[in-house]
């Protein structure tokens, strides 16, 4: 599938990035921070581009260099290996890294979305028994969350379903073609990379939010996807998973503080235009990074901001 046209905000962000790369924008005096993001067309990718553009325009401390990836798991591996300085990841993918990885903030909520063909027999997750299911790209957070979702619904991911891991656009085309039966991803509402054709519909996952929370902890929330978030789609409930902006513990305090200052003071510029229905950068939640401790440079900014 081809992606949607660039939004004006995203086009401006990418133009700003190109300008920063070509003309320098004083970047020789800035610390370059590599940020592992996600697939082109997804919210991680869009958010990383906007954050980089904001840094180019507003910061004399840092230059952010987004790195396109498959998603959360790959991002965490790259961060642990020192290949990047910062990374976006779903909260349920972030584990105990022995203090090597810390948080800059909880930036927004991803929504689990399970798409099936509109006229098909799949009405709930348990109906996926014996079906072919795409659980996000290899290296994505949806691959982790998807296995947990299937298990909570009483299915063994290794036995009861045929699991595939295709990139989002390819998987959406496979669903349209009938070569898979269901597609799960974690993203914003709507997800820019996915033009949901008329034959698709979203499965309501609301009944599994509580059991997921009981089984795996408070990283899961009950959230609502409004009607017509995708053309003709009804309102459904689903499961929200917090997204964390993470950093290596070795990231200098000054660089960490500069990134958090962008989150705090330039939040409006960091919301992709396609972000209807999702919670971005609310000051009440930025510091809510769960079991992942805040970077000292980030904590200092939050202390000043909250007074």
Image (cartoon, rainbow, N blue to C red):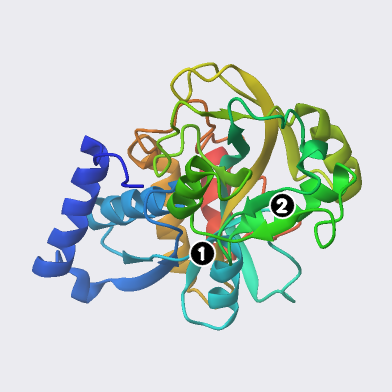
Could one spot residue 307 in this view of the protein?
no
Closer to the observer: label 2 or label 1?
2
Return the mark for residue 145: 2
Q: In screen coordinates, is 10 left or right of 261?
A: left
Residue at x 48%, y 23% (from the top left corner)? 229
The tag earlier along the polypeptide, 2 or 1, is 1
Residue 160, position in %: x, y? Answer: 84, 54
Whole-percent x and y of residue 26? Answer: 16, 68
In the picture as drawn, the residue positioned furthest to the front comes out as: 178
Frontmost residue, 291 versus 69: 69
Measure the C-alpha gap from mark 2 to mark 1.
18 Å
- Residue 25 x, y percent position in the rendering: 14, 64
Against 85, residue 272 (above or below) is above
Q: Nearer the viewer, residue 237 or 106?
A: 237
Q: Quadrant of the C terminus?
A: top right
Q: Residue at x 76, y 57 (%)?
A: 291
Q: Quadrant of residue 48?
A: bottom left
Neighbor class of circle 2 (other Cα within 10 Å; few <14, some 14-19, many 20+) is many
Q: Which residue is mark 1?
A: 87
């Amino acid at each position: 599938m081809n992606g949607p046209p660039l939004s004006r905000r995203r086009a401006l962000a990418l133009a700003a990035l190109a300008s920063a790369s070509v003309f320098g924008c004083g970047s020789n005096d800035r610390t370059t921070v590599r940020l592992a993001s996600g697939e082109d067309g997804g919210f991680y990718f869009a958010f990383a581009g906007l954050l980089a553009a904001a840094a180019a325009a507003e910061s004399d401390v840092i230059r952010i260099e987004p790195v396109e990836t498959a998603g959360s798991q790959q991002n965490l591996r790259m961060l642990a290996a020192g290949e990047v300085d910062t990374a976006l990841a779903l909260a349920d993918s972030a584990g105990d890294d022995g203090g090597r990885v810390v948080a800059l903030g909880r930036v927004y909520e991803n929504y689990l979305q399970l798409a099936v063909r509109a006229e098909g027999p799949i009405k709930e997750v348990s109906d996926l028994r014996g079906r072919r299911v795409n659980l996000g790209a290899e290296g994505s957070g949806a691959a982790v969350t998807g296995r947990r979702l299937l298990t909570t619904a009483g299915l063994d991911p290794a036995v009861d379903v045929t699991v595939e891991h295709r990139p989002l656009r390819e998987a959406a085309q496979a669903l349209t073609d009938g070569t898979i039966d269901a597609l799960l991803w974690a993203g914003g509402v709507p997800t820019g990379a996915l033009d949901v054709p008329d034959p698709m519909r979203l499965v309501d996952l609301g009944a599994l939010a509580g059991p997921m929370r009981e089984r795996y902890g408070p990283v899961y929330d009950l959230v609502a996807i409004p009607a017509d978030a995708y053309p003709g789609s009804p309102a459904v409930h689903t499961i929200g998973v917090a997204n964390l902006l993470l950093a290596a513990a070795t990231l200098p305090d000054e660089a960490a503080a500069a990134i958090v200052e962008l989150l705090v003071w330039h939040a409006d510029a960091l919301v992709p235009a396609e972000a209807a229905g999702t919670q971005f950068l609310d000051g009440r939640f930025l510091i809510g990074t769960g079991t992942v401790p805040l970077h000292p440079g980030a904590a200092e900014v939050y202390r000043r901001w909250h007074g």
